[in-house]
Amino acid sequence: MPIMSALENFYIPLVIGWLLLLIKGGFRTRIVAVVAVLLIGCTEFICSDVLKPVFNRPRPYYQLSKIHYYDHTPKTWQVTPERSTPVIGRSQSMPSAHATNIFGAAFFLSFFFRRYWPFFYLIALLVGYSRVYLGDHFPLDVFTGGLIGTACAYLFARLSAAGIHYFESRRSATDQKSVTTKS
């Protein structure tokens, strides 16, 4: 499960996939590729910079005693010590930024590439599950992050679809106009 939560494991496949969309894709696909990056930036900002400070909920390993969690620095499993009070303000848990970003991306990409929705959501579910499995988040953190990411993605998808439709209709009108002028 640490593999599903470590972003560095996804850098190369994500960059290659994104570049393929930009290079091989048509107008619509290129717009989707660019807006997907903007969406992730927006969901990351909303989750990490706006909502986490508001909720200020400590991670499970700062709040609960004697739970197993995966320590990312030495890359080993640890058990939390006995806690009488939670450690507040060290690292916030609610909502999960991983879940916000991945569910936002899954919804957005599924909106435009409907054929691949099972793949997008399988990845999102595995990432969300891994956050709880590793002890980084409570299930509600992941669920909330998924809802926030999906809501942001819905807004971005609707605006993108409207923008794509607008520019494609203008382009086809311009193409029809140039064909009639040549005749």
Image (cartoon, rainbow, N blue to C red):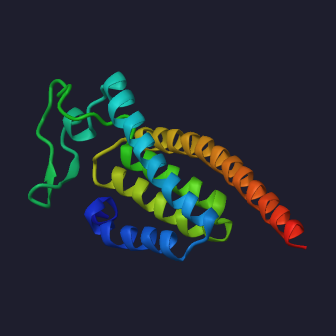
Residue at horizontal 14 percent and vertical 61 percent from the top: 75
Quadrant position of the C terminus in the picture: bottom right
Quadrant position of the N terminus in the picture: bottom left
Residue at horizontal 17 percent and vertical 24 percent from the top: 85
| Nearer the observer, 55 or 80 | 55
| Nearer the observer, 70 or 53 | 53
Along the horizontal axis of the image, is 25 left or right of 114?
left
| Nearer the observer, 1 or 182 | 182
Q: Is residue 6 visible?
A: no
The location of residue 129, given as percent across then percent down, is 41, 56
Question: Which quadrant of the structure image shows residue 80?
Answer: top left
Q: Is residue 79 visible?
A: yes
| Nearer the observer, 68 or 139 | 139
The location of residue 121, given as percent across then percent down, is 55, 61
The location of residue 144, given as percent across then percent down, is 48, 38
The location of residue 65, given as percent across then percent down, is 19, 37
Q: Is residue 121 above or below residue 104?
A: below
Along the horizontal axis of the image, is 165 left or right of 22?
right
Q: Is residue 158 above or below residue 107?
A: above
Residue at horizontal 63 percent and vertical 63 percent from the top: 28
